[in-house]
Amino acid sequence: MNGKEKNTGAPVLLVADDDEYVRVMFRRAIANAGWELRETDSSSGALEQVLADPTAFRALLLDVEMPGPPVEDVIREIREAGCNAGILIASGMAASDRKDRLEQLVDGHFLTKPFRLQDLVRELERFK
């Protein structure tokens, strides 16, 4: 599918965040920005969805702190599976060595929580 959903033609975004409220807020913003949204509440759920079809997603939005394997491991496995989707990290983490490593893994695509939905949409435009 190359990052596009068969039915709508819209690019598909996978949001992995264990906070239901955050996912609800993303649903509204993402739909209005022309994306189709898929969701999961864990890093293992994100990995499962991507491994099932590595070309299904145009972009992935991954929270750092959620149930499942460390997000760094998930990103590596996703790339090894041949998924070329853009990856955006969202976290409330302050400056740290881990944050620096994560930014390197995703080419600097990092949003610090809390962020405005407009900032998310602007970042996602880079992946369309």
Image (cartoon, rainbow, N blue to C red):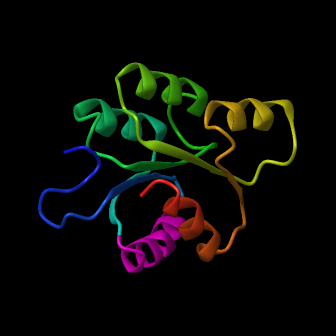
101 magenta-colored:
no
**Most frequent secondary structure within the magenta stretch:** helix
Q: Position of residue 97 (x, y in %)?
A: 84, 30
Q: Position of residue 110 (x, y in %)?
A: 68, 49
| Residue positioned 60% across, 28% down in the render | 72
* Residue at the limit of the structure toward the right, as seen here: 95
Closer-to-camera residue (55/94): 55
| Residue positioned 23% across, 33% down in the render | 52
Q: Position of residue 23 (x, y in %)?
A: 47, 65
In the picture provided, is 70 more to the left or to the right than 59?
Answer: right
Q: How many marks?
A: 0
Boundaries of the magenta span = 20-34
In the picture provided, is 98 more to the left or to the right than 39?
Answer: right
* Residue at the limit of the structure toward the top, as seen here: 80
In the picture provided, is 118 more to the left or to the right than 76?
Answer: right
Quadrant where the N terminus sits is top left
In the picture provided, is 111 more to the left or to the right than 13?
Answer: right
| Residue positioned 23% across, 35% down in the render | 53
30 magenta-colored:
yes
| Residue positioned 50% across, 33% down in the render | 68
Closer-to-camera residue (8/17): 8
Asked if residue 86 is positioned above or below residue 50 in the image, the reply reads below
Asked if residue 80 is positioned above or below residue 90 in the image, the reply reads above
Asked if residue 62 is positioned above or below residue 73 in the image, the reply reads below
Quadrant where the C terminus sits is bottom left
Q: Position of residue 101 (x, y in %)?
A: 74, 29
